[in-house]
Image (cartoon, coloured by chain):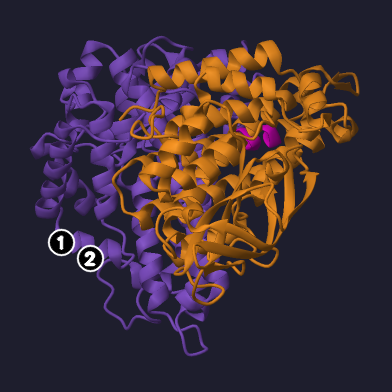
Chain colours: A orange, B purple
Amino acid sequence: MDFSNTEEQQMLQESVQKFVHKSYDFDTRNKIIDSDKGYSEENWQLFAELGWLTVPFSEADGGFGGSAVDLAVMMEEFGKAMLVEPFIATAVLSGGLISAQGSAEQKAEILPQIMEGKLQLACAYAEPGSRYNLANIKTTAVADGDSVVINGDKTAVLNASNAEVLVVVARESGEATDSEGISVFLVDAASTGISIHAYANVDGKKAAEISLKDVTVPASARLGSAATAFSALQATIDRATVAVSGEAVGAMEALLHKTVEYSKTRKQFGTAIGTFQALQHRMADMFIECQLARSIVIMAAMKLDSGDNQLEKTKAVSAAKSRVGKAIRKVSQEAIQIHGGIGMTEELDVGHLFKLVTAVEIMFGNTDYHTERFASL
Amino acid sequence: MNADFTAEELQFEQEVREFLQNDFPADYREKIDAGIRLSKEELVHWQKILYKKGWAAPNWPVEYGGTGWTATQKHIFATEMGLIGAPEPVPFGMKMVAPVIMAYGSDEQKQRFLPDILESNVWWCQGYSEPNSGSDLASLKTSAVRDGDEYVVNGSKTWNTYGQYADWIFCLVRTDNSVKKQEGISFLLIDMKSPGITLKPIVLLDGHAEVNEVFFDDVRVSASNLIGEENKGWTYAKVLLTHERTNISGVPRGKRRLAALKRIASNTDDGFGGNMMDNTAFKKKLAEAEIELQALEYSELRTLAALSVGKAPGPESSILKIVGTELAQLMDELFVDLAGYHCLPFVPEQFEDGFQGESIGPGNSAAAALTYFNNRKLSIFGGSNEIQRNIISKAVLGL
């Protein structure tokens, strides 16, 4: 038993910290969010050079190892600095799904481009009426000779406006909520019939609503075999769930740290507000929440990396997301409350951390959803 | 980063499991499952079984008869004990006074007291809290005035658990009124048979008198029973309080109780043709408790892993106390939820050993409210959860 970071994990951590210290202060981040693409291509290239884009991928895929613990450790640092670059969208979700479902040829063609920072992707799985049910896919894919015609609407697609390739989850057979019958297609984002309505999320990350009308792709665009993609989708989302949970752990640490430091300097009634027991106990509770969240994310990441069966893994992921979600609400709301009015302002980073973790609470299923999924498994 | 046991640790786990299966008396196990308290004789008997095995004192150093186990081995032992429901050693001798005697007692005191604690020949109780000194323990007033080779002790101690069984009591007493409150306290060992000691049982909400108030009326105590130096008692007591924070999370017992909740829930009618596992509200609360237990377990493992690479137990362990006790209390509520009407009969005697009458309610559902009442103590004792939050604020957050 050893819960300290491995040398590699430490290197990853330090690598992100160094980058953030040098080139990702709060003002820089705001400028990046305000830019056209909403992320920095220059940073993305740097991420590739630093090897970060290989972290989600196994050695067999040419990656760093694909350990969920490594990923969570790195994402924690991303969370502290609120990086908006589309790491989850391109590398973890799209890359992950291609790695899990794609053929050897498809992987060999696409994954190196992701790891080298040459390709932006977006994973279109959620639909306007699906909420968090991954099997609820109404988008249809109908074979027509050597082609497949895709029709449907996708929602909350991270990074869609920057993606050259969309990884589209569509149904080839079965009823709307069957887990059987789901396939995944690589679709050129510039294809005829695709319209992308882009916006920024509350955490500054780019996303979009997508509609696909008679979008025609060659059958070779299908990842792996037809109608079999559900378990790969679920495994990919599970991994991404642990990744964003790690991101939230980092952001919550930052919220706690900033709140404690602020309470030591902010004076009211002639004394630092941090001397008030009413606030001290609330910050102690924030600390406890941060620790429990960290513990359970480590647990879930370890389970993903272990030989346990898929059910155990999925259950551990839901446990983690449920507990992290609870911590998110508590820690982020208390951070704003203890900061008082200044915590409400755009100019302070605390409010932005609040928004980031609020987004994480929703992503890939909120607290209630994961509590119920945990109970049902 | 990994949560795996080594091959040796797995083998040790197996050894502990087999020992407990074979040697923890089956009738004790049945009683515990039925919500019946073990008697003093039974607790001592079980402790002596552990002593014979050489496992009576996992936390003691080998030189005093301890096991010499690693932090992980201690964790495994505590886990297996908790999973099977075997009572931990009564803590007052083994975990509370013994470490203080080892650290600050004279050689004569060590030889006189430690072997009997190890063998469970002598039952100890605790004399810390007073009617007017709870969380502010250092304000205690029970006085010990030196008179030749003796101290004369006057005052009273309260929340004294199982004092009715005890042969000896370890006390914090005031030996100097003229200095800062923490600096005038001494650590004194007192024979419970001393003239001038009287015990008044305090009946708690569950109908059981597990605690007492102890009165000292001109009790004469040999000065040779003073631990260490006069007026240094607070330092000694604090050492005692900061140690022994491992195994406080109650995770193994929590797992056992969670399994019981699931078992009972699926055998309890929901009143609408199904069972309580079909009840959405209950099921959600149960899931939250299970998730909390996992978060707690991994928090404890992280603390343990830090210990096993030689780091001192930090104030972070206050987390384990707070979360562990609050989760145990949450589970108490779930048992009450499940029992419904059947937790209302207040018949504590049916959970006393040897009860011959007809039990009321299915299973031990009538124990649910009693346990719920009794366990409100968890967040109050051992440094109340508010005191633990003070510790986190000061020692971790630097507030």
Give how far apart the Cα atoms at labels 1 and 2 are.
Answer: 6 Å
- Position above or below: A42 against B8: above
Q: Nearer the viewer, residue B159 or B279?
A: B279
Eyeballing the image, is A58 above or below B227?
A: below
For this rendering, which residue is in front, A10 or B332? A10
Q: Give the percent coordinates (x, y) of residue B286.
A: 49, 63
Q: Residue at x 39, y 51 (%)?
A: A313
At label 2, the amino acid type is Glu
Which chain is indicated by disc 2? B
Q: Residue at x 35, y 51 (%)?
A: B253
Image location of residue B215, percent across then percent down: 47, 39
Q: Which residue is mark 2?
A: B30
Kindly state the secondary structure of the residue where label 2 is placed.
helix
Residue A331, position in %: x, y?
68, 39
Left/right of residue B57 with respect to residue A143 in the rendered view: left
> For this view, does B366 lie left or right of residue B24?
right
Q: Which residues are magenta?
A: A281-289
Question: In what quadrant of the picture does the C terminus of chain A appear?
Answer: bottom left
* Mark 2 Cα-neighbour bin, 10 Å: few <14, some 14–19, many ≥20: few
Q: Are marks 1 and 2 in contact (CB under 8 Å)?
A: yes
Does the rendering let one see residue B128? no
Q: State left or right for residue A85 relative to residue A35.
A: left
Residue A72, relative to residue B37: is it above or below? above
Q: Give the residue pinned by disc 1.
A: B26
**Overall secondary structure of the magenta section:** helix
- Secondary structure beneath disc 1? helix
